[in-house]
Amino acid sequence: MSLASDPKQLWDDSFEEAIALEAYNTAPVEALVRTVSYYFRGRYTPEALRDLHFLEMGCGAAPNLVWLARKGVRVSGIDISPKALALGRANLAHHCVGERVGDLVEGSVAEAPFPDASFDGIIEACVFQHLDRQTRLKTFAEVRRLLKPGGIFVGYMLERGHTIFQRKQAEQLPEDPGSLLLEDGSSKIHLSNIGLAHFFSAEELHELLTGFSVVDPCLTTYYLPREEAAKRGYDEYLQSMWTVHAVK
Ligand SMILES: C[S@@+](CC[C@H](N)C(=O)[O-])C[C@H]1O[C@@H](n2cnc3c(N)ncnc32)[C@H](O)[C@@H]1O
């Protein structure tokens, strides 16, 4: 089954497997923390952060929302997987930040049920990279619709220097260049078996965010430890990602 055909089932299965192994992500994504922290610094006092409302698209178990809520920011999230959302709700409650939580809704990032210009910021990590072309276009249109003028978008997504893209680029989907179908029959948790994976180019990100006053895709790369690379069948595994900083 590819992500394009039934993303809700695939992500629910993936979370079920991760819950059984206690292997779902509970750490805020470093690139988001760094980029959002730079943005806040010198712009907002701790008190002023309480007036901001941020949305995470594809919030999963909500580690990024916990980080934001602990800074005082009001947070909302949307995710297609009920299992992920249940973890997210429990995680936010566990950190006693319930009072900073707005809406946590089940649904697709391509049709987020919020009014226009609802948010001061939108974040996403490793979600937009799994959308098929049509859903990807609709989702970036949603980012534009949901942000207030001057609002910030920070995203973290696959880039084409990634080891997997470098090895498999001959298998790109003809109808969606940059996309691969990755199904090696092993765990659903790793990128190698998550189904559709899209590797963005800088040009494409500028196009998807046309009309934004700032569009700054910054490259973030690191090598996995050799033991981790070996588990995935590689001698060397470069994680090459965009950290996209954009202002509407
Ligand atoms: C790799 S996880 C990342 C979770 C979280 N952003 C984090 O940093 O821990 C991807 C998440 O996106 C969600 N997701 C995937 N496709 C989605 C869609 N079309 N609409 C909403 N959520 C989606 C999945 O259910 C999953 O929780």
Image (cartoon, rainbow, N blue to C red):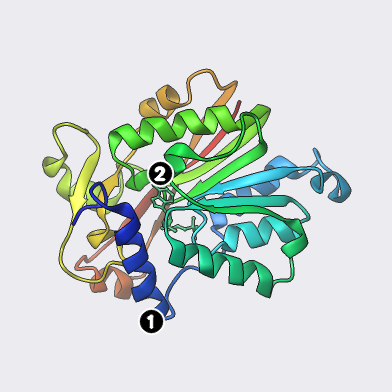
Type of amino acid at the residue the image marks with label 2: Phe
Lower position in the chain sequence, tag 2 or tag 1:
1
Q: From the viewer's perspective, is 236 left or right of 27?
A: left
Query: At 43% from the left edge and 45% from the top edge, which residue is drawn?
Result: 108
Q: Which residue is mark 1?
A: 20
> Residue 223: which numbered mark, if any?
none
> Residue 128: which numbered mark, if any?
2
Q: From the viewer's perspective, is 62 left or right of 182?
A: right
Q: Could you classify mark 1 by the number of other residues whose Cα lies within 10 Å: few (under 14), some (14-19), or many (20 or more)?
A: few
Q: Position of residue 9 (x, y in %)?
A: 31, 60
Pick the front one: 72 or 79 = 79
Pick the front one: 50 or 5 = 5
- Quarter assignment of residue 15: bottom left
- Quarter assignment of residue 45: top right
Pick the front one: 40 or 225 = 40
Q: In this rendering, is residue 158 above or below 147?
A: below
Q: In this rendering, is residue 160 above or below 117?
A: below
Q: In this rendering, is residue 213 above or below 175?
A: above
Q: Is there any visible trace of residue 27 in the rendered image?
A: no
What SS does tag 1 mark? helix
Q: Position of residue 183 (x, y in %)?
A: 17, 59
Ligand 1, by image quadrant, is: bottom left
Q: In this rendering, is residue 228 above or below 33?
A: below
Which quadrant would the N terminus be assigned to in this image? bottom left
Q: Position of residue 88 (x, y in %)?
A: 56, 65
Q: From the viewer's perspective, is 241 left or right of 98?
A: left
Q: Is there any visible trace of residue 45 in the rendered image?
A: yes
Query: At 58% from the left edge and 63% from the top edge, which residue is drawn?
Result: 63
Query: At 45% from the left edge and 32% from the top edge, which residue is drawn?
Result: 140
Q: Position of residue 2 (x, y in %)?
A: 21, 53
Query: At 53% from the left edge and 18% from the top edge, which residue is drawn?
Result: 211
